[in-house]
Image (cartoon, rainbow, N blue to C red):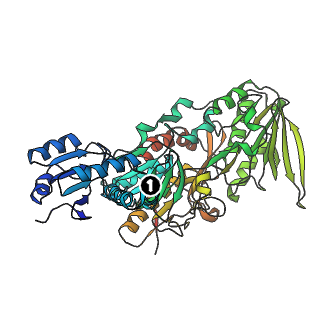
Amino acid sequence: MRLRLDITKLDHKLSVAGQISIDDITEIATAGYRSIICNRPDYEGGENQPGSEELEAAAKLLGITFVYLPIRIGSIPTERAEAFQKLMVELPKPVLAFCGSGMRATALYGMTQQNVQGGPEAQESVVATCDWDNAFDVVVVGGGSAGIGVTASLLKRRPTLRIAIIEPSGKHYYQPAWTLVGAGAYDIAETVKPMVDIIPRNAEWIQIAASGFDPEHNRVHLSDGRVIGYRQLIVCPGIRLAWEKIEGLEETLGKNGVTSNYQYDLAPYTWSLVKELKAGKAIFTQPPMPIKCAGAPQKAMYLSCDHWMRAQCLENMDVEFNTATAVLFGVADFVPPLMDYVRRYHAKLVFNSNLVKVDGNKKIAYFENKGNDGTVTLEAKPFDMLHVTPSQVAPDFLRDSPLADAGGFCKVNEKTLQHTDYPNVFSLGDACSSPNTKTATAARKQIVVVAENLLAAKEDRELTAFYDGYGACPLTVENGKVILAEFGFGGKLLPTFPLDPTVPRKLNWFLKTTVFPWIYWNGMLKGKEWFACPGKLR
């Protein structure tokens, strides 16, 4: 009799299959199977997965022996393989073993065969080379805006996809508002939610850190030793704040007047410093690129200066912006209006100046200044307030993997966001090598490109969606006005609205403080792709 199940016969005693249903058991009995081994943990696939007790009850009614031997996805413990081998001796034959896809059951069979033929060393070899392709349709590494958003968009397109999100954090943050928090214009509590409330329904959350990639065998290694298999992989673990690159910084963060809006618990300290400081030296820094939201370092300066101006103490302040770059902003069209505010606040700009050391107790910051002739000199500057933007790098487990480019970021075609060496791998967000600005708005556009192109690759269709480099940087130049900088590759202006994008507007402040956060939580993270239609490759 031909079964609806896709069953693979391994030998005359054992066959394997993917997840079975209650209705399948009658056909399994009719086909002559006398025993069933369930290797899939209960509810691994969600509430719709039948439980082992239900399956056992149905099997017993038909005279089939049913055994529950759950195996978590990843490396199989030796004792589980030994238990499986013992069952294969004791159970009535033939036996049908099943899991989510049949791969774990197949791996158990291979381990028992090696155990008989070659002992523990051969058994370990089988574990190492086991193919986990069918464990998940898609594995998403990273539960930030890119990871949650692309998972939600994929599930809206294909609800039956089995997707795992690998993310160790129990909280999800709306980071674009931290600059506002540092200016007393936003409640820090409104920027965080429990991760469990953000993970899309029907996606599986694996709350552990990734530790490495094995794209040759379609596997992701986890920090607890497990190995997760995939058919397709999306890499979006974000970017790491490398505080350690500035000597002495970590010891003084959050005290001695040293702060940063780039960290959740430090943004309120920024506002505390700004409120309390009535006179003195305030230094704002920007490291070499790449960094998240290239406008954020100077936004902190503008909002602080606006407060001091309103408090009528700006004339007592010595404000300085030290940037390791050679320009104020990377898109030339926005430099003139920004310079108007620099002059308005009497701020001093110091280009090619990189913060390398902080002595918090003495309140001295040390900068390496690069001259026009290439010479580098070290300069010490006293401060009363120091707002630091840390250096930012790709996560170590990505940087040290075959997926990385020379800079450590996931190497992709900048238009399709598909990996240039591994066609079943895609990347988006801050960890991707595309030369766009690293912002949540960039991820919003990239999400649709990855979702459409990943499914096209899955279904052997041509990749047609392309990313144009779009990113947006709402430059908060004063409390109540924002320059909404929207641009793509090459600095091409890509304004959403038919207004001069270089003009500071109250409307843009409303968008920044009210509309954008609402769209983020209720749209982007839920698979709603408003204003995010991608271009099409010809």
SS state under label 1: helix
Furthest-top residue in view? 276
Q: Is residue 484 left or right of residue 259?
A: left
Q: Residue at x 71, y 54 (%)?
A: 329
Classed neighbour count for the residue bearing mark 1: other residues with Cα under 10 Å, few (<14), some (14–19), many (≥20): some
Q: Is residue 477 left or right of residue 15?
A: right
Q: Residue at x 38, y 52 (%)?
A: 163
Q: Position of residue 71 (x, y in %)?
A: 35, 47
- The quadrant holding residue 346 is top right
In depth, the one of 13 and 292 nearer the eye is 13
Q: Is residue 348 left or right of residue 490?
A: right
Q: Position of residue 256 (x, y in %)?
A: 77, 28
Count up the numbered dots: 1
The answer, for residue 428, to whether it is visible in the render is no
Q: Is residue 138 left or right of residue 363?
A: left
- Pointer 1: what residue? 120
Amino acid at dot 1: Pro
Furthest-bottom residue in view? 538
Q: Which quadrant of the rendered structure holds the N terminus?
A: bottom left
The answer, for residue 436, to whether it is visible in the render is yes
Q: Position of residue 214 (x, y in %)?
A: 51, 60
Q: Position of residue 526 (x, y in %)?
A: 40, 46
Q: Is residue 13 above or below residue 78?
A: below
